[in-house]
Amino acid sequence: MTDAARGHSTATLYEASLATARACDPGLRAAWPGARVAGPAFTVQGIGGDNLALHGAVATAPAGSVLVVDLQGAQHGHWGEILAVAARHRGILGLVVDGGVRDTAEQAELGFPVFARHITVVGTGKEHPGRFHAPVRVGGVVVRPGDLVVGDADGVVVVPAESVTKTLDRSDDRVAAEQRALKAIRSGMTTVEYYRLA
């Protein structure tokens, strides 16, 4: 996980956000085990079955951003090893796409984090340039340019840009509280006792 989320997991951010963070639906998941990403969203609106917008996004997005792409959940391999290599060379942190990808083993070896709805070899066209820097809907969540996007083994969470600092501060506090709870539980206290559930 990058410093953009202070190392916090999606679960911690979601719970600490006081309902400002949004969880993408569970169909959007890591394309390879261990993929983790956190950074500001560079939003892309494309057309399912066409990946020209992704080529343009890789050439346009600033280093340190996460591509967040609406492709309407299309079951096509919009993204693969070549785009991942190009994106990594440009300093792009990862990809969250409501659509399909391929070459997952190669991307795992490269260490390029990808979160997608499908893994498929079905090819794409290259006709629609798409548009950038506008709100998109990915995994049922509206994502705006600059929102913090975090993905890990548990899913993908989006924190609105205006709530990031408060959410990260509350996440710090939540982790500290959980460490105190774990210490007590490891010393023999039950969760019922610690949380006063009875």
Image: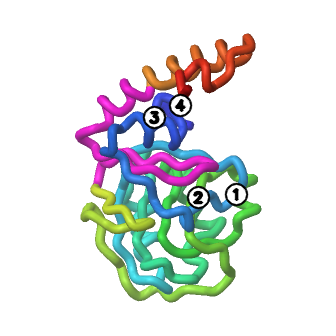
In percent of width and height, residue 137 lies at: 35, 68
Nearest to N terminus: mark 1 or mark 3? 3
Going by the numbered disc 2, the residue's amino acid type is Val
Left or right, residue 147 beside residue 190: left
**What residue is shown at x 36% (from left), y 62% (from top)?**
141
The structure residue drawn at horizontal position 51% and vertical position 17%, both measured from the top left corner, is 176
Q: State which quarter of the image contains the N terminus.
A: top right
Residue 190, placed above or below residue 78:
above
The span shown in magenta is: 145-171
Task: Tell me the kind of residue under disc 3.
Answer: Ala
Q: Please give the label number shown on residue 5.
A: 3
SS category of the residue bearing label 1:
loop
Residue linked to disc 2: 114
Distance in Å between CA atoms under marks 2 and 4: 18 Å
Which amino acid, by three-letter code, is at mark 1? Trp
Q: Which mark is residue 32?
A: 1
